[in-house]
């Protein structure tokens, strides 16, 4: 992939439409993980809304300690630092919701492709009848002494121009915008749109408006029969009936009992 200057600070800074999100911005050709780099920058005093983006990660992290890989220059790999003032820890789930909404809306705005979400943190693109994973979100949060959210590092990885042959092989089949659209997508346009949407959603949430309804409306998981697996709990099968304010998936089993699932892997039955 050709080295693109399009994600350099000067060019991104001139294109951003946000007021505060991404106004402090670092671009790195290669890092271990943008979330880990952001953690270091946060310790040095990075401000609320700082963004760190890399063209390549040698140790990109996915949920549940999995790897997150993309060839250099083919993806959007970024971490957003938020210092939510007065947010209780439970509201951390809202941040994943906001990022999912922002990512799905940005993809739709830039490509015209319909984008959906899979509980808890996958960004999906439709290919015919099936939905494939085009991105993922990883929240690393730290609490203050009172149990409130002190810092939240929101990692966002979107498979933008990854060719079919280089897509990761994973439990949820992967795709990229390139594969789904049939042509490459400008990463800067997508980044600018993503940050604009995320800023808007964050401000609404900071004013007390829950993103859970809008998030639930984009989840392909709801209404489906699912299998849930999670470390330390018995496998669960049932119908995903909804989500709650804390982002937990509400699954009703065959005996009619409702389970609130906070973390785990979900497989959709059928299709
Ligand atoms: C998942 O689907 O399991 C979450 C993937 C999150 C990947 C992004 S890429 C940018 C940021 N830095 C990381 O190391 N991980 C997240």
Image: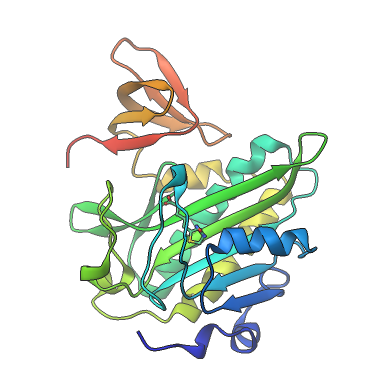
Which quadrant of the figure contains the C terminus? top left
Asked if residue 243 is positioned above or below residue 193 in the image, the reply reads: above
At a point 60% along the width and 44% down the height, the residue shown is: 94
Asked if residue 242 is positioned above or below residue 67 in the image, the reply reads: above
Q: Nearer the viewer, residue 257 or 24?
A: 24
Asked if residue 242 is positioned above or below residue 66 in the image, the reply reads: above
Q: Is residue 167 left or right of residue 151?
A: left
Q: Can the viewer see residue 51?
A: yes
Q: Is residue 206 left or right of residue 235?
A: right
At a point 37% along the width and 53% down the height, the residue shown is: 116
Q: Is residue 53 left or right of residue 204?
A: left
Q: Can the viewer see residue 198?
A: no
At a point 58% along the width and 34% down the height, the residue shown is: 246
Quadrant in the rendering for residue 224: top left
Q: Position of residue 99 (x, y in %)?
A: 54, 55
Q: Position of residue 40 (x, y in %)?
A: 69, 61
At a point 60% along the width and 59% down the height, the residue shown is: 36
Q: Nearer the viewer, residue 112 or 26?
A: 26
């Amino acid at each position: 992939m050709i080295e693109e200057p399009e994600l350099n600070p000067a060019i991104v800074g001139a294109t951003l439409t946000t007021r505060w999100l991404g106004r402090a911005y670092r671009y790195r050709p290669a890092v271990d993980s943008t979330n880990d780099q952001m953690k270091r920058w946060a310790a040095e005093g990075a401000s609320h809304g700082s963004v760190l983006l890399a063209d390549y990660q040698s140790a990109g992290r996915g949920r549940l300690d999995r790897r997150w890989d993309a060839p250099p220059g083919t993806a959007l790999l970024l971490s957003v630092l938020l210092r939510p003032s007065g947010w209780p820890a439970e509201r951390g789930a809202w941040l994943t919701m906001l990022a999912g909404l922002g990512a799905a809306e940005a993809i739709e705005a830039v490509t015209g492709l319909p984008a959906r979400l899979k509980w808890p943190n996958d960004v999906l693109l439709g290919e015919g009848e099936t939905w494939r994973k085009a991105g993922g979100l990883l929240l690393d949060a730290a609490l203050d002494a009172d149990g409130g959210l002190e810092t939240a590092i929101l990692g966002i990885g979107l498979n933008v121009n990854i060719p079919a042959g280089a897509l990761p092989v994973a439990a949820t089949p992967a795709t990229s915008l390139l594969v789904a659209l049939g042509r490459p997508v400008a990463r800067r346009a997508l980044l600018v749109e993503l940050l604009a949407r995320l800023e808007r959603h964050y401000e609404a949430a900071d004013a007390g408006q829950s993103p859970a309804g809008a998030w639930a409306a984009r989840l392909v998981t709801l209404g489906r029969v699912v299998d849930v697996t999670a470390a330390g709990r018995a496998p669960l099968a049932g119908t995903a009936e909804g989500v709650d304010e804390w982002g937990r998936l509400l699954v009703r089993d065959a005996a009619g009992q409702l389970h609130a699932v906070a973390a785990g892997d979900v497989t959709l039955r059928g299709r």
